[in-house]
Amino acid sequence: MDTLAQLAAGFAVALTPYNLMWCLVGVTVGTAIGVLPGLGPALTIALLLPLTYKVDAIAAFILFAGIYYGAMYGGSTTSILMNTPGETATIVTSLEGNKMARRGRAGAALATAAIGSFVAGTIGTIGITFLAEPVVNFALRFGPAEYFSLMVLAFVTVSAVLGSSAVRGLTSLALGIFLGLIGIDLQTGQPRFTFGLTELLDGINVIVVAVGLFAVGETLYIACFRKRAGSEVLAVKDSVWMTREDWARSWKPWLRGSAIGFPIGAMPAGGAEVPTFLSYFIEKRLSRKPEEFGQGAIEGVAGPEAANNASAAGVLVPMLALGLPTSATAAIMLSAFQSYGITPGPLLLQQQSALVWGLIASLYVANVMLLVLNLPLVGLWVKMLKIPEPLLYGGILVFATIGTYGISQSQVDLILLYAMGITGLFMRLFDFPTAPVIIGMILGPLAEQEFRRAMTISQGDVMIFLQKPLSLTLLVLALVAVVGPQLWRLLRLRSRSG
Amino acid sequence: MDDRRIGRAPAWGDAAVGAAVLALAAIVAWQTNLIPAHAVYAQVGPKVIPWMATAMLAVLGTLLTLQGVRGGWQHEQHGELNVWALAWLLLGLALNVVLIGLAGFIIASTLLFTCTALAFGSRRLLRDAAIGFVLALASYVGFDRVLGYKIGSGLIEGLL
């Protein structure tokens, strides 16, 4: 069947009233948590993972995907009106967006962000539609050795290349790999790192780690170490629409942002920081009014916001086609596949074609719903920003308790949750990224599995990873990604002093 | 971006983080050594990847400690530690762990909510406790009774 026929079958799944309802719930919850500072899609999907025992896989993934896309839309509202970006991906939006809001142009900024998100989200989803199968066809040639090397490359790019320090990123990753190793080794049945606790035999649940790092850690940080008391929420004085000039200045940045964001998101590295900053600098250079940048230039909202959403869509390509998560949210979605007993990877598209195509079709639907939710109804979300902090964070900790204690009604999980929270606080204080912990925890055991398979095939010869050309290429890329920037710096220092 | 700031006084906080990572490496090594490995049928036993993780942590811990001693790395600017906020939060979390089994989710969560609100500077104790109670009650009914997502029993839970 060709792609369009598959997509049509997907729409038949996504457009049933039952699945439309899950999509609507997802985008609404997603926008809400995107708007609320301190909450993100990774945390929310982690808290909702127990739903996977109650509803079928298609409904759950439509819900999760709606949350994922919705959080991207909601995040821009907060960064425009409050200048306290919750996620690194929306820092750039706040640069110009908040300035526009201060000049009384909040409505135009919100409109260009929402419509730009729609354009980019739709282009990104078209990208997923047509890229998924070619990537799968390429990946079907992968053996365990290639898979292991690909995972090593992803490990390195998500932790060492993005972010401010390779050493700290890799430390976070190593912590995640350690957490993922806890529990019974599935191949040999040996317990590992259980410290004699029977509660740890099944391993640490990813919910505990994600909620601990993102919810408890963030709450501790905001309460104990924040510099100034809550920043003001700017009012939306103008109408949430754009003038003819705004349209003329926005449509090209939307398209350029999408063109930058999607490919970068789809690469094994993932990440939204690079494409949003790249888009910002490109728009600044191409703008006819570069003097407006820093004062509230609409291009500086339109481009990065599109890049952000397109890269979020791009991240789903390696997730769906290869089973390779490159963001914390994707990693948690991958663990949802596992809890359904579905093996993510290139065979997913064949074995679970209704699920994957239903999910892709629902992404188109989600984008349309989000445009409606975020343009005419934006006033509703602005009200949510006015929830007093003491109540907001009190609620976050109560929901963190439900999500954790509900796993097994065990206090051990709660203590682990708070230990992860304190770890998260220290990681925040000492500038360690948290996403690599989640990625290492989910992807680590999968990498171990591929490593063992490859070694079984080669009868214990490690050289298998270097003898297969594709595997070797991936490993060389990983090495260049770690060592390259350091070498480059050394060379520049040398040439400067010499 | 540059982690090496030459000629600075040691940043003991950063060095301590490096030492903590080294300590974690030691714990991982100790536990890896304890993994029973009599299963010879596998080419790669259960210890191989744990040893790799140990090595990674040891190398990174050493690098972090060295960076710390050489002046540390750049941090985002943080505010001063708010001791009262920390105390209220830790109290709330401790009460939650202890009481959730003894008194039940609703009482434990109401106290956690109230302590968190106090940590964030709220001065309206009764209002916060009331909101916390309603939220905990509604969540319990919603999750435990309607969705069937068990969050335990307790004093108030028994009355419902």
Image (tube, rainbow, N blue to C red):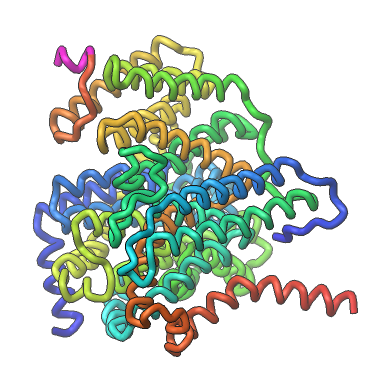
Q: Quadrant of residue A297?
A: bottom right
Q: Is residue B157 found inside the magenta-colored segment of the image?
A: yes
Horizontal side of residue A463 vs B96, given as left or right: right
- Which quarter of the figure is the C terminus of chain A placed in? bottom right
* Depth check, front residue: A95 or A45: A45
Q: Is residue A320 left or right of residue A94?
A: left
Residue at 45%, 88% in the rendered image: A467
* Residue stretch rendered in magenta on the structure: B155-160
Q: Residue at x 48, y 63 (%)?
A: A271
Q: Is residue B78 above or below residue A90?
A: above
Image quarter (top left, top right, bottom left or bottom right) of the N terminus of chain A: bottom left
Q: Residue A122 versus residue B148: which sits nearer the camera?
A: B148
**Count of numbered tags:** 0
Where is residue A173? Give x, y as percent.
Answer: 50, 57
Q: Using residue A209 as the reference point, say whether residue A485 is left or right of it.
A: right
- What x and y, as percent, mark residue A315? 39, 66
Task: Using the image, determine if residue A132 lies above or below residue A249.
Answer: below
- The residue shown at (73%, 58%) is B3
Residue B11 position by quadrant: top right
